[in-house]
Amino acid sequence: MSQPYSLLILPGDGIGPEVMAEVRKVIDWFQANRGMRFDVSEDLVGGAAYDRHGTPLADATMAKAQQVDAVLLGAVGGPAYDSLDFSVKPERGLLRLRKEMDLFANLRPAQCFDALADFSSLKREVVAGLDILIVRELTSGVYFGEPRGIHADDNNPDNEGGRVGINTQRYTSGEIRRVARAAFDLARKRSNRVCSMEKANVMESGILWREEVQWVHDNEYPDVELTHMYADNGAMQLVRRPSQFDVIVTDNLFGDILSDAAAMLTGSLGMLPSASLGAPMANGRPKAMYEPVHGSAPDIAGQGKANPIACILSFAMALRYSLGEGAAADELERAVEKVLADGVRTADLMGPEGGTPVSTAQMGDHIVAA
Ligand code: ATP
Ligand code: MG
């Protein structure tokens, strides 16, 4: 019999533990009904870890994260921790995981469930059936490049205020190639199309980006359809006719903006999953962490109101990308779709027509039943 899949679950703070409890139900269902075996360990992260250990991520937890097939994270942070020193803030736990696991590819799917098409900021006919995946480079680019800082602009008497703020967009060919490979690998599991976005018309890093993505394509993924687009045009196309895209690969800054825009194509924050992938491990699968896009939502924490779907869909991504269980991922996504089509709604999904929302636990039960 093959090894069980190893999962590290880090529920975190706020609604994190509430939504993660529903993922546990889904895991139990797959164990009981699909012959899958999971070796699940659970640990603390964020404020919960700070309360126990005085640090938002204990070394032992970090070490465990490096060894498992997938890390599932709920959410971190909350008002109780706002006044903490920056070095022990809950968010630092998350940043440490990303940095030490070297999770350089951030995956944000924007998928429109038909039952929620009216939630989109666009017309139903534009978003119906929408299913795109944005792959954002997460560990380099203008957020990290040196030099950076705010300096006195001493030799420039014409500069009112006398200061200059500097950031540097810097990408190496290796950084571009590895995220390009991640995008091409993902495209092969989907509709086999990648659109790469940059500003090669005005940026040197954009020229390098385009050349290196093309190089990876020509040498390693000639079977995948590759197009290039300037990121400003990409933003326009994303809201004009989003269904033209399958996988979009782009840098850290453009990806930050484009993935938030894409998120609004599909509606509630409570619906949006994400994955962050690193380099392949010995088994050929990438190091990976899966988490809902939303935060700890302190305003509704502890009330059983949170929508667990973002977290459940993040687990579907783990099934697909870390465990090689694509059929199970499809099955889980179909269950979510069915429940929504049946009209089951948590409070965040209530339209103007009203109705009675279900609780976090009830939504999880409906999905398991489906
Ligand atoms: P962070 O800084 O961690 O991103 P945030 O304050 O920016 O946190 P969230 O914690 O995601 O954002 O909350 C934003 C709003 O969305 C809140 O009003 C919250 O209640 C709501 N919200 C977030 N996640 C969910 C969810 N799963 N179900 C229902 N409502 C949610
Ligand atoms: Mg936020």
Image (cartoon, rainbow, N blue to C red):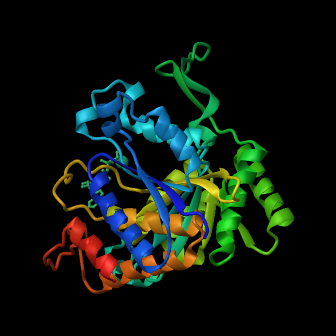
Q: Residue at x 43, y 36 (%)?
A: 57
What residue occupies the far front of the structure in this picture? 1
Q: Of residues 295 and 33, which is closer to you in this image?
A: 33
| Image location (x, y in percent) of residue 175 | 71, 46
Relative side of 28 to 69, left or right: left
Position of 250 relative to 310 (above/below): above
The quadrant in which residue 171 appears is top right
The quadrant in which residue 66 appears is top right
Location of the C terminus (image quadrant): bottom left
| Image location (x, y in percent) of residue 167 | 59, 32
Q: Is residue 356 visible?
A: yes
Relative side of 185 to 310, left or right: right
| Image location (x, y in percent) of residue 107 | 54, 59
Q: Residue at x 44, y 34 (%)?
A: 58
Position of 53 relative to 10 (above/below): above
| Image location (x, y in percent) of residue 99 | 56, 39
Please state the quadrant of the image where ligand 1 appears: bottom left
What residue occupies the far top of the structure in this picture? 154
The quadrant in which residue 271 appears is bottom left
